[in-house]
Image (cartoon, helix red, strand yellow):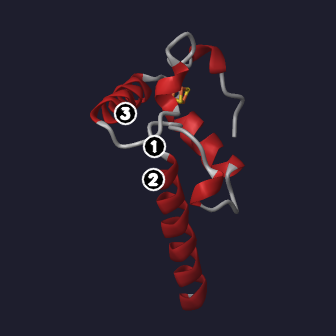
Amino acid sequence: MTDIDWTQALCLGADREKWFVEGTTADANADRAEAKKTCFRCPIREDCLTSALAEEQGRGESGRFGIRGGKSSKQRYEMTRRRVGAQSKQQRVA
Ligand code: SF4
């Protein structure tokens, strides 16, 4: 992975609590949606997500925190599970 220019991160200077909000109240959901919207406008979103997935390798869902690269901890966990499942399937076929 190339060096990531984190100075371009749109969450810098934003209300970072919105990336780590918990619960399912309307306010919590609105905060999460706003954080994800910001991520999807972020110029380093792909790198941010790739970095999170690499850093969290081997962790379960409970070992991942916050929104990174526009994905929740649960979404990143599911992405990893699908990827590992697809790799296992490829290895069985090969
Ligand atoms: S993608 Fe989201 S979490 Fe990652 S640097 Fe950009 S704004 Fe921050």
Tell me the distance, in whole angstroms, between the alpha carbons under discs 2 and 1.
6 Å
Residue 37, percent across and down?
35, 27
Q: Quadrant of the C terminus?
A: bottom right
Front-lying residue, 83 or 34 = 34
Query: Which of disc 1 and disc 3 is earlier in sequence?
Result: 3
Q: Which quadrant, please, contains the N terminus?
A: top right
Neighbour tally class for label 2: few under 14, some 14-19, many 20 plus, Cα within 10 Å? some
**Left or right of 72 in this view: 62:** right
Report which residue position mark 3 lands on. 28
| Residue 25 sits in quarter | top left
Residue 71 drawn at (x, y percent): 45, 43
Q: On the image, numbered disc 2 is attached to which residue?
A: 75
Tell me what residue is drawn at x 72 percent, y 29 percent.
3
Helix, strand or loop for disc 1: loop
Above or below, comparing residue 13 to residue 43 in the picture = above
Which element is circle 2 on? Answer: helix
Residue under the point 53% across and 37% down: 68
The residue mark sitting in front, 3 or 1, is 3
Q: Mark 1 points at which residue?
A: 71
- Residue shown at 61%/49% (left/top)? 64
| Disc sitting over residue 90 in the figure | none
Dot 3: few (<14), some (14–19), or many (≥20) neighbours within 10 Å? some
Q: How far apart are marks 2 and 3 (CA)?
A: 17 Å
- The amino acid type of the residue labelled 1 equals Lys
Residue 56 spot, x, y in % from top left: 67, 52
The one nearer the camera, 70 or 24, is 24
At mark 3, the secondary structure is helix
Mark 1 crowdedness (10 Å alpha carbons): few <14, some 14-19, many ≥20: many
* Kind of residue indicated by mark 2: Gln
| Callout 2 touching callout 1 (CB < 8 Å) | yes
Circle 3: residue type: Ala
Above or below: residue 62 compared with residue 93: above
